[in-house]
Amino acid sequence: MAIQDAVKSIVESLVTHPEDVEITYDELEDARLRINIKVNPEDRGRVIGRQGKTINALRTVMKAAAVKTNQRINIKVVEEENSEDSEVERYAEEA
């Protein structure tokens, strides 16, 4: 759970509305962990950063931490309007 707590702590420190941060975790097969980050629409830009640099830095740090536990991590910033089906389609496109 240390990785999940670290993600939550980092994201909450980046945003102006930490009370709106929702982080969900899905344990997948082959020791994979999918982390979905949902924030206030005003804070999406803060979490993503210019040209995606902030979210990419978060992904890099969390992937490095996950190596110790032999896990693979996939981190996404999701919109509130997204349904479960569209999230699944996004993950399928990346694979």
Image: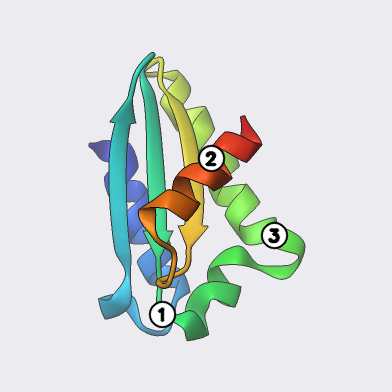
Task: Where is residue 60? Give x, y as percent.
Answer: 59, 39
Q: Quadrant of residue 25?
A: top left
Q: Where does label 1 land, which residue?
A: 40
Amino acid type, callout 2: Tyr
Q: Where does label 3 land, which residue?
A: 52
Mark 3 or mark 2, which is nearer the start of the sequence?
3
Task: Where is residue 74? Give x, y as percent.
Answer: 49, 37
How many C-alpha atoms fall within 10 Å of the one at disc 3: few (<14), some, or many (≥20)? few
Mark 2 or mark 1, which is nearer the start of the sequence?
1
Q: Are marks 2 and 3 in contact (CB under 8 Å)?
A: no
- Rounded to the nearest angstrom, the CA distance separating label 1 from label 3 is 17 Å
Residue 40 against residue 36 in the figure, above or below: below
Q: Is residue 68 left or right of residue 5?
A: right
Q: Nearer the viewer, mark 2 or mark 3?
A: 2
In what element is the residue under mark 3? Answer: helix
Residue 94 against residue 30 in the figure, above or below: below
In what element is the residue under mark 2? Answer: helix
- Rounded to the nearest angstrom, the CA distance separating label 2 from label 3 is 17 Å
Residue 58 against residue 26 in the figure, above or below: below
Task: Where is residue 15? Give x, y as percent.
Answer: 44, 76
